[in-house]
Image: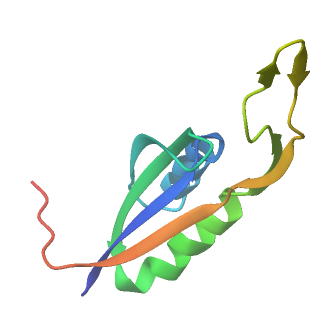
Amino acid sequence: MAMKLLVSIVHSDDADGLTGALRDGGFSSTKISTTGGFLREGNATILIGTDETDVQNVLDIIKRNCHTRTLYVNPLPPVMEPGELYMPNPVEVQVGGAVIFVLDVERHIKF
């Protein structure tokens, strides 16, 4: 049976709920804390190895547990001019959700 490795990058707020849901669904996972994106916010990279026939089940669990959110952020730091302070307007951005890579596993070894 063919094995797949799912590499899922999720928002850190969703990571613990996702790993719990994966465990409840009978899937093992490894969580690695990461940072990325233009906001430099905390992410988690979740590694899940599974049979090819279970890939859709794992994707469904990820979709149910990783949600997109709207944040308002200042794109630039305040600008100080002599005698003036310019505060840029906040910008609406979407964060969260999941980015998933599904890779073929050539060999799986478990000791």
Instruction: Give the position of the N terminus as an image quadrant.
Output: bottom left
Q: Quadrant of residue 98?
A: bottom right
Q: Is 91 in front, or is 77?
A: 77
Residue 25 x, y percent position in the rendering? 53, 62
Which residue appears at 59% of the width and 48% of the height?
38
Q: Is residue 82 above or below residue 97?
A: above
Which residue appears at 61% of the width and 73% of the height?
60
Q: Is 70 in front, or is 98?
A: 70
Q: Quadrant of residue 71?
A: top right
Q: Is residue 83 left or right of residue 108?
A: right
Instruction: Give the position of the C terminus as an image quadrant.
Output: bottom left
Q: Is 59 in front, or is 41?
A: 41
Q: Is residue 40 left or right of residue 79?
A: left
Name, please, the residue furthest toward the top: 83
Which residue appears at 90% of the width and 18% of the height?
84
Q: Is 12 in front, or is 59?
A: 12
Q: Quadrant of residue 57?
A: bottom right
Q: Is residue 92 above or below residue 75?
A: below
Which residue appears at 53% of the width and 81% of the height?
56
Name, please, the residue furthest toward the front: 82
Residue 70 x, y percent position in the rendering? 83, 51
Residue 81 x, y percent position in the rendering? 81, 20
Q: Is residue 81 above or below residue 91?
A: above
Query: How many numbered discs sit on the rendered protein?
Result: 0
Residue 79 x, y percent position in the rendering? 78, 26
